[in-house]
Amino acid sequence: MARRRHEEEHDNHERWLVSYADFITLLFAFFVVMYALSSVNEGKYRILSNSMVVAFRNAPVSSVGQTPTVIPTPSPTVVTPLSSKSSEGLRQKEREKMRQVAKNILDVMAPLVEQGKVRVLETSRGVSIEINDSILFSPGQALLKPPLANAMQSVAEVLVAADFPITIEGHTDNMPISNAQFPSNWELSAVRATTVLRLFADAGIAAERLTAIGYADTRPVEPNLLADGRARNRRVTILIDSEIPEKSTELELQGQAPPAAERTTVPPAVR
């Protein structure tokens, strides 16, 4: 029987070229798509460019040969600080109200003002009424003398019609006091200020408007060397404070950035 001859098969070593050609074709198509997506519309680009220039330079810019794109630029808004006009107007009105209150107090205390026992002053805080305590209290006592109680009642009637915060300060000379009721001048000055405060509260002045402070002999207005100076230092001061809050700036530690904004504080009504 004749042997069947098998033809010898040869391997195709160039088959990889088919896959390579397919890969190159896909890669080319990918870059064509990417290029098509990255194409920039020149007209839209110029509109965007003009808008950016107008926004940052505040001036319209247009390309040559094209219709300029007009973008309305809002006119700058001038913000007037509150403290320059409106706040100053409020302060002026407040000063006028305070001067009227001071005038009314001068009228009701005229006899004592003429005697030099009462002084009415205008300060940066408002109006200050200094009353010599010799006409208000007996030495070492904190009860109002009956004749002056009526005068203080008249002052209270003037103040009850206003809205200003009121601070009552008690002051003494440097002569020490020590008894069962007042161990020191601190207690004496504080109780005298509180006595006037209670009279004002009973007259109808709102409690939240009233503050009483005792300073003892720490704030003399005259040297305590002579009797006249000590008598001048023994006093009760009634401060009619401003209602408009003052602007204050917060202080930072050295090396830190300055405060970003100012804060507003309101004078305390009650301590």
Image (spheres, rainbow, N blue to C red):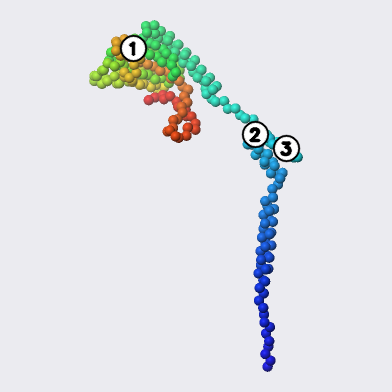
Q: Which residue is mark 2?
A: 58
Q: Quadrant of the C terminus?
A: top left
Residue 189 seen by the camera: no
Look at the numbered discs 2 and 3 and tell me whether their residues touch, using CB distance below 8 Å: no
Going by the numbered disc 3, the residue's amino acid type is Pro
Q: Which residue is mark 1?
A: 232
Determine the image quadrant of residue 147. Answer: top left
Q: Please, what secondary structure does the residue beneath circle 2 have?
A: loop
Going by the numbered disc 2, the residue's amino acid type is Asn
Q: Nearer the viewer, residue 246 or 209?
A: 246
Residues under labels 1 and 3: Cα distance? 82 Å
Can you say whether 27 is above or below 177 in the image? below
Q: Please, what secondary structure does the residue beneath circle 3 have?
A: loop
Residues under labels 2 and 3: Cα distance? 15 Å
Residue 23 relative to residue 122: left or right: right
Q: Which residue is mark 3?
A: 68
Which of disc 3 and disc 1 is earlier in sequence?
3
